[in-house]
Image (spheres, grey):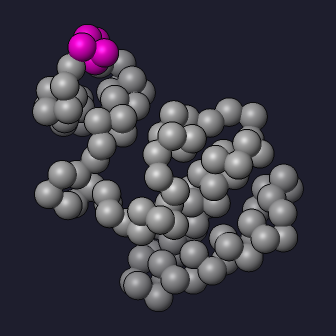
Amino acid sequence: MPKEWTKKDERKYRHIRDGAEDRGESDERAEEIAARTVNKQRAREGRTKTASRTSTEDMSSSRRGGQRSHSGPKGRTKAQLYEEARRKNVEGRSKMNKAELLRAVERRK
C-alpha cells in the first residue's frame, strides 16, 4: 500500500478487497477494485496531486454501490465514455453525444 495512505485508508482497502474476494473476484481484481475505490475517495477529499473529473464531480463510490458497473441498461456515463475516448485519442470526441462516444470507444478496442 502507498505510504501516503492513512491507517483508515488501509483498513478500508482491506475491507473492500476482502469483500470482493468473498464475492468470487480473483485476488488481483479484488486488489484493483479496492485500490481504485480508496484512491478515488482520496481524490474526492483533495489528498492527491491529481484527480480526474469523474473522481471529483461524480457521486461517491460508496453511494453509487455498483450502479454503473458497465452492465446495467444505461452502462457507463457520458463522462466515463469521454475519459476513455480521451485516453484512446478519439478525434472529435468533444462534439459527440453519449451514443456516439460509445460507438467510437467500442471501435477502438
Look at 42% across and 62% down and name the residue there.
64
Q: Position of residue 26 (x, y in %)?
A: 45, 75
Residue 94 is one of the magenta-drawn residues: yes
Identify the residue shown where x is 32% and y is 63%.
67
Relative placement, left or right, of 54 versus 51 is: left
Residue beneath the point at 84% across and 70% down:
7
Count of numbered badges drawn on the protein = 0
Is 55 rendered above or below residue 65?
Answer: above
Q: Is residue 5 magenta?
A: no
- Image quadrant holding the C terminus, namely top left
Q: Residue at x 50, y 60 (%)?
A: 61
**Which range of residues does the magenta coloring cover?**
91-95
Q: Left or right: where does residue 61 sit relative to residue 76?
A: right
Which corner quadrant of the image does residue 16 belong to?
Answer: bottom right
Viewer-side residue, 86 vs 97? 97
Determine the main secondary structure of the stretch shown in magenta. helix
Going by the image, does 18 lie left or right of 101? right
Q: Is residue 102 above or below residue 44?
A: above
Provide residue 44's location: percent of width, then percent of height: 64, 47
- Residue 104 appears in the figure: no
Residue 50 picture location, percent across and down = 68, 33
- Quadrant where the N terminus sits is bottom right
* Residue 71: percent from left, percent from top: 22, 60
Which quadrant of the view contains residue 3? bottom right
Residue 109 visible to an observer of this rendering: yes
